[in-house]
Image (cartoon, rainbow, N blue to C red):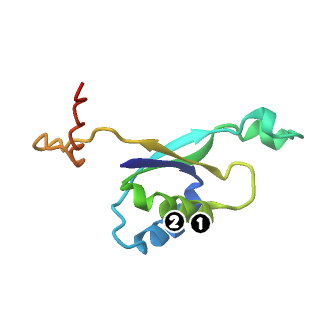
Amino acid sequence: MKEIRAIVRPQRVPQLREALRDIPNFPGLTMTKAEGFTAPASIQKRSVKDELTDFTPKVQLSVLVDDDMVETIRSTIIKVCTTGQFGDGLVWTVDVNTMHRIRNGESMLSPEPPTPKDPS
């Protein structure tokens, strides 16, 4: 299981929501408000506007998915959220080793098969 995280422009969320809902078996997502700024070294010519727009509003998304859905969801996020401008955001993937339902403590991941013992 993986967690896909993305930081995107808030204006792109409605289009992204529709595109993600069109993916069969899409599991849903969590969204939080965030603020950020582009690393100064990545902008060759900083302007007054760049200096005044530090900490622009962003949205952080989190989606827990089976491994086989990662590329579809990641590519959808990139396709929908790309404007070609600085500040379009980031998308990354994190391995999820454990996950439990709070309601009853039930593990949400399939148990790992037992490791065979070394016969020696």
Q: Are marks 2 and 1 in contact (CB under 8 Å)?
A: yes
Secondary structure at numbered mark 2: helix
Q: From the viewer's perspective, is residue 30 above or below residue 99?
A: below
- Closer to us: 117 or 67: 117
Q: Going 71% across and 39% down the picture, which residue do you hit? A: 38
Pick the residue in front: 110 or 113: 113
- Residue under pointer 2: 16
Amino acid type assigned to the residue bearing label 1 in the image: Val
Q: Residues within 10 Å of mark 1 (few under 14, many from 20)?
A: some
Q: Quadrant of the C terminus?
A: top left
Residue 95 — which label?
Answer: none
Considering only vertical position in the picture, is 87 above or below 80?
A: above
Q: Earlier in the sequence, mark 2 or mark 1?
A: 2
**Residue lying farthest to the front in this orientation:** 120
Percent from the top left, x then y, of residue 76? Answer: 54, 65
Q: Is residue 120 left or right of residue 6?
A: left
Residue beneath disc 1: 80
